[in-house]
Amino acid sequence: MFLAFKEMARAKVRFALLIAAIALLVFLILFQQSLQNGLITGFIGAIREQNAPVLVYSVDGQRVLQGSVITPDMEADILAAPGTGETGPIGQGTFTGLPSGNADGETFDTTLIGYVLGPDGNGIGAPTTVIDGRLPTADDEAVVSDADVALGYGIDDTVTLLPGGKQITIVGVAENAQLNVAPTLFVSYDTYLDAVKSVNPDAGTPLPNVLGVIPADGFSADEAVASINEQSLALDALTREDAAAETPGVAQVQQSFNIIFLLYGLVVPCVTGLFFLIVTFQKANSLTLLRAIGAPAGRLVSALLIQVVVIIAIGLAIGTLLYYPVSQQALGGIALQFETAAVIFWSVLLLSLGVLSSLVAARRVLRIDPIEATTGQGVGS
Amino acid sequence: MTTAPAAVSTALQLTDVRKVYTMGDGSDVVALDHATLTLGSDEIVALVGPSGSGKTTLCSIAGGILSATEGTIVVGGEDISGHNAKELTKFRQDKVGFVFQSVNLVPFLNARENLLVVDELGKRTGAPARARADQLLEELGLADRAKNLPSQLSGGQRQRVAIGRALMNDPALVLFDEPTSALDTKLGEQVMELIQGEMKSRGIAAIVVTHDERITHYCDRSVHIVDGRLEA
Amino acid sequence: MKLALKELRRRPGRFATATVILTLIAILLMFLGGLLDGLIASSTGAIRAQNADAIVYSDTAQASFVRSRIDPELRAQVEGVDGVTEVGGIGNVQLGARVPGNGPRDLASVALFGYELAPDGVPDAPAYGQAWADESIKADGVEEGMVIEVGPARTPIAIIGFVKDTNFNGQSSLWASPDTWRDTLSANRPDAQLGPDVFQALIVRGDGDDLPDTIDAATGGATDSYTVDEAVNAIPGVTEQQGTFNQIIGVTVAIALVVIGLFFALLTVERTSLYGVLKALGARSSTIFAGLVAQAVVVTAIAALIAGTLVVLLDLLLPPGSIPLLITPSRIILSVVLLLVAAVLGCSFSLRRVLRIDPASAIGTTS
């Protein structure tokens, strides 16, 4: 322990540089982890959040809400499927919204998701996790996603849709309920229809984009999906989880980030391993001397490992500290969160990899022959 | 065989040279005290003394590696007493040769390239330097070892390469730091014979720092140094 | 400097690990850059291709085609603005297309444009029912002459040729006459259908310093006009993606700097005695430091070369559409330049130590 810390104190610049490298890498990895989760949640949070276990798109929709249209024929097919229990239409549209809670009078792309409210606002398609306020129980009331509150979409705020001037009042806030990384309002189906007409008088009555389906008794969500898809090739039924995961773009985002994480994750053990290998070579003479005067080899190796663990731990701590304030921000509409699970995962992973990588140096330390103290040889060349 | 330029008659003139180090706690350590020494242009002098006697300090000052606190140093006619670091660097390139105790050849350069290092770092004359290097290697009996790395040479061969490197820039003075300390008696004698031969045949002055009384007879005279002071 | 390069050649092993790490970092830089370029290109191609001095949306559209409507009266106003020479309508609709030979649930994503003034690289609007297609649609199996069925109404569109780099919102663009577009829109998106002669936006050519502002002023704020560059940046996600990615790239370059600084600081410590000898022989500090920088530059250049090759290979091996990667020479060159700058700056951590090495340390017993 003593050796380990004494050496680090005497060579501050080197160890500081190593810690800096690790801290920056940890920061980047954690930041991108938040970015990835924030992006995906921002894209399809609403889909995961709404309460229908099965969503039926039209195949033409390519698993995107706004592209999908359920015609009356398709609706009939869905109702005829044995796996279908109750259904409810869900409509989605993007509008220009002016939230009254925004001090600068800014307008934002605002997504409206319309569903049939039912007696208490908890109809098929309603958000499941209302963390503040309540569900809408009448027309022109809305539940907004928590990420949007900061933009001016708070409880009791009104959102004016432009053009047309239709107004909607926010009555509740749901967790992680955004769609397409834009402010998202869950409203009654009639409110949605009204909104469409108000901005485009030429529009006919829109058909629902998807049908939310509760599986019939005795059917699991997967079984309901299969039975509906059998009805017609024009139908594309998915469980809620699949609908979220297979939205175009989500898989791309995950694959891209996976490559990025792999590369960054490799850099950390390489840098640590290289550093300790070189430093071990440089300390060759003093290590040999210590062995000659009786220090057990195990002690020297444990001094090395202590350094590795301490360095990586400090790097992790600094990196996480840098990450914390950044993780509280909204980045262009993407709400970032402090991903505790990611911090734990990467801490364990990087510590393990770092220790593994330093085993190369440890092997060298173990191979030192104390007799070389007298001949003046040592480990290096 | 080349002859030394006969322009100056003394290779080295140290007059009243003092070197004082100030320690961390404010106290002064006098490493060299009122050292006065003159070397003729082809004299070989043995500088003998125990460890810590200041012989390394004297050598370093004479070679322009260290600045003196007080005193005058004239090497090959050039007064280096007041030289700044840049001027000393140039001085070392041109006028002095070193053969270090631990030889200190560049480990990844072969024998020939080690000789050419000084030219590379300084004047970059190119072809003339290469010709001189080849000639020196020949004269030192290393012509067939020109392409070998130091790790492929014996202790004595490495010593000879170091000597060749010291002679490359045709110096006024060569400083040998404990040239035989790592060698056995026989090899040590061989090296001293070589040094004596090379210095004398080229008419170059040399200081041989040593604590080994066995080899002083290869030198023209011995100068003893104890606790920073020279004895006649 | 020759000395330093000789060491590199004679002792490549000691630089190998640092080169590996730098290669990883270089790959990261090029990959991140390529990802950014790919995302932006596939979102903004259609707008970037427009040969326009102004793109005009309606005032509350937030630069979004879907929410913009320009009726004939508004268009007439724009046409009458001082400096405007040509005005063409444009609109689009995003649908799934059925391609002959593909499975019934395997649709191609397309953005069908109706246009009057042709964008760069796109010929004039074809006959009714025909369209030029962005070549990216070939990845979905589309060939010249094929008739694809667009949208739930299965509107037939014949593909008469291909154009490049005109994609919109990550989807393959189709370029057709305004009538083709308008009819397709009505048939497939009845809730978004537009009356005859109504467009979503206008492509305007003209003179004048600030045509977009002039137009908006002349229409009394009923329009929201942009230059092509501004319209590109107004596409949702573009500026955020650029900002975020550039920040990540910046921090990665900083990491490269620190890694190089670290590696060469270690190397300098190891070579202290060698440098002492060289200084004793007459080497200047500047010569030694220049050698260090030369080594850093060469190691970085080699890493960048390997990384560039691997990234190009990765690009070729990736199935089209899996990751939006666009590898351009300018991105690779930029990454290399950034790394080289980081290499030179990283060496500065060793400068002080090189300066402090005392030639006197070469004499006397070496410990």
Image (tube, coloured by chain):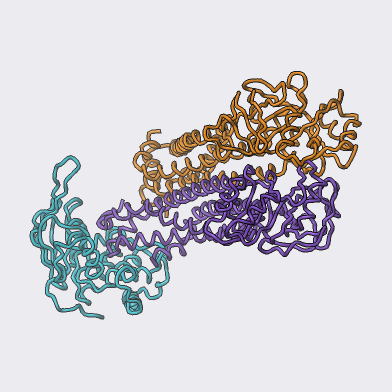
| Quarter placement of the C terminus of chain B | bottom left
Q: In this view, does A339 lie to the left or right of A309?
A: right
Kindly indicate the quadrant of the structure image that contains residue B4: bottom left
Kindly indicate the quadrant of the structure image that contains residue C146: bottom right
Q: Is residue C71 above or below residue C281?
A: above
- Where is residue A261? Give x, y as percent: 59, 44
The hue in which chain A appears in the rendered picture of the protein? orange
Q: In this view of the protein, which residue sits in the foreground, A42 or A261? A: A42
Q: Tell which chain the image draws in purple.
A: C
Q: Residue drawn 64% across and 28% down?
A: A144
Q: Is residue C126 left or right of residue C205?
A: right
| Quarter placement of the N terminus of chain B | bottom left
Q: In this view, does C98 lie above or below B25?
A: below
The hue in which chain B appears in the rendered picture of the protein? cyan
Q: In this view of the protein, which residue sits in the foreground, C21 or C30? A: C30
Q: In this view of the protein, which residue sits in the foreground, B62 or A205? A: A205
Q: Is residue C285 above or below residue A72?
A: below
- Where is residue B142? Give x, y as percent: 36, 73
**How many dots with numbers?**
0
Q: Can residue A96 be seen in this view?
A: yes
Q: Is residue B65 left or right of residue A343?
A: left
Q: Can residue A297 be seen in this view?
A: no
- Where is residue A189? Give x, y as percent: 76, 29
Q: Is residue C165 left or right of residue C351?
A: right
Q: Is residue C75 above or below residue A258?
A: below
- Where is residue C242? Give x, y as percent: 56, 48
Q: Residue drawn 67% across and 54% down?
A: C76
Q: Residue drawn 45% across and 54% down?
A: C342
Q: Residue drawn 74% across and 31% down?
A: A114
